[in-house]
Image (spheres, grey):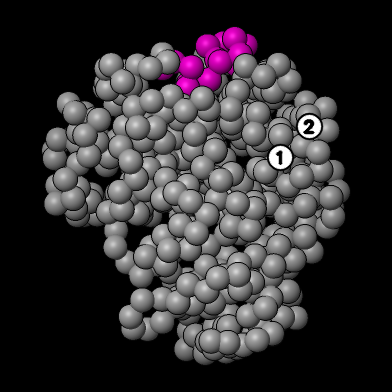
Amino acid sequence: MSDASSGDCTEHHCTKHDCTRHRAAVTEAEVDALIRGICFKTGPPRTLGVEVEWLVRDPERPWLPVPPERLEAAHAAVRTVPLDSPLTVEPGGQLELSSLPASSLMECVNSVSADLTAVRKVLAGHGLALLGVGHDPWQEPTRFLHEPRYDAMEACLDRTGRAGRHMMCASASVQVCVDAGYEEPGPLGYERRWWLAHQLGAVLVAAFANSPMTGRRPTGWRSTRQLHWMEIGPGRAGAPPIDGEPRADWARHVLDSPVMCVRRDEGPWDVPEGLTFREWTRSRAPRPPTRADLDYHLTTLFPPVRPRGHLELRMIDAQPGDDGWIVPLAVTAALFDDPEAAEAAHRAVKPLTERALDRPAPHNPLWSDAARLGLADPGLREAATACFTAALAALPRLGATPEVSDAVAGYLDRYVLRGRCPADDLPAGAGATDPRAHARKDIRS
């Protein structure tokens, strides 16, 4: 999750004039206009990105936590390696690589693959490896980073239970970023892509579910990671209604979402309770909000689809194997950026919309079924089969290599057509008797 950014002026590489502007107080009307202007940048879909997040473990004892001093030394060593992708350390010590915008699928795949190879080599020198799983199957969430942002985040999320700690410290994902799309209507228009992202999102949850355990016991959910996102609640981790104009819907959602924290230059940050950003602009207490505060507020909202100029799809569990992340990247890219595949995906997911009961994702029955049942759900399996088939046909048109197409075809055959997902590879209760069971198919691959 690339939400570790501080949102301050240095992050935006501001000029002195820009910094002054970011520190100026903003009104409710200005916030509304800013959100509408910055969150959907339309134009021909030309770029693609991926953020791959991993747990870091000792491959000989993956069920044990890595001591903080050992983890810190490994992180420091990785930071010395020249990478194309920005590297982030997450609150629980997870590592994330966030690709730069790529002009093609293969440019994205090749760049991130090279970076991961370099990272794995350094970690191996420290006796560590990357583990691709949506949620730690063994350990309770333990925070590695102790910074004001994460202190405030933990205090805020603890008000609704422990799900926030699981999200921060024990989860990992594959996040695919696609352009917002054309201003004009059509299969690549931004309104259609916004709608598709929220309906297709449930299919992606089900097809790539890979987190069936916590505390060495099955949870009864194929994607425990997605369960925790739902438990965090709609104000922090929910989508807006998607039946209106996307810019207006998102602006309203941002204004009416609770403020996680009010940053301070010194000491712990304030964690207000029940204060929305709209109310902050009106009350202007404990101090007037600024443009920098708005930028930061946007990073503290965790909907399944987040508009950041582009669309960030955040619902996919981390995948097993060194290259498992390539399949969700390729499938998602094809279904969004190939017009024929996008049209096929729209037709495939449309019958599922009634199951959402007009409730925003992920807090509706469709998304709940996707996380709990995976592709054992007949409707989700049928939609996934149609979507993967369309994506497979589109990949050559996107310039995918035979290796990438073969990986998608293999996934279609091994999982989708059989109504299975990676979570089903772990026998029920295996974690209680053999803690290496889940890691064998991944960390040693």
Q: Is 329 on the left or on the right of 311, as rendered?
A: left
Instruction: Say what amino acid the circle numbered 2 marks.
Output: Arg
Q: Is 432 on the left or on the right of 276, as rendered?
A: left
Find the magenta span and give its range: 413-426
Q: Residue at x 53, y 78 (%)?
A: 292
Q: Residues within 10 Å of mark 1 (few under 14, many from 20)?
A: some
Query: Disc 2 marks which residue?
Result: 355
At which x and y percent is residue 173? 46, 40
At which x and y percent is residue 370? 63, 29
Q: Nearer the viewer, residue 258 or 410?
A: 258
Q: Residue at x 33, y 41 (%)?
A: 140
Total numbered badges shown on the rendered structure: 2
Query: Disc 1 marks which residue?
Result: 364
Q: Secondary structure at mark 2?
A: helix
Q: Nearer the viewer, residue 285 or 206?
A: 285
Q: Residues within 10 Å of mark 2 (few under 14, many from 20)?
A: some
Instruction: Note whether 121 is above or below 303 in the view shown.
Output: above
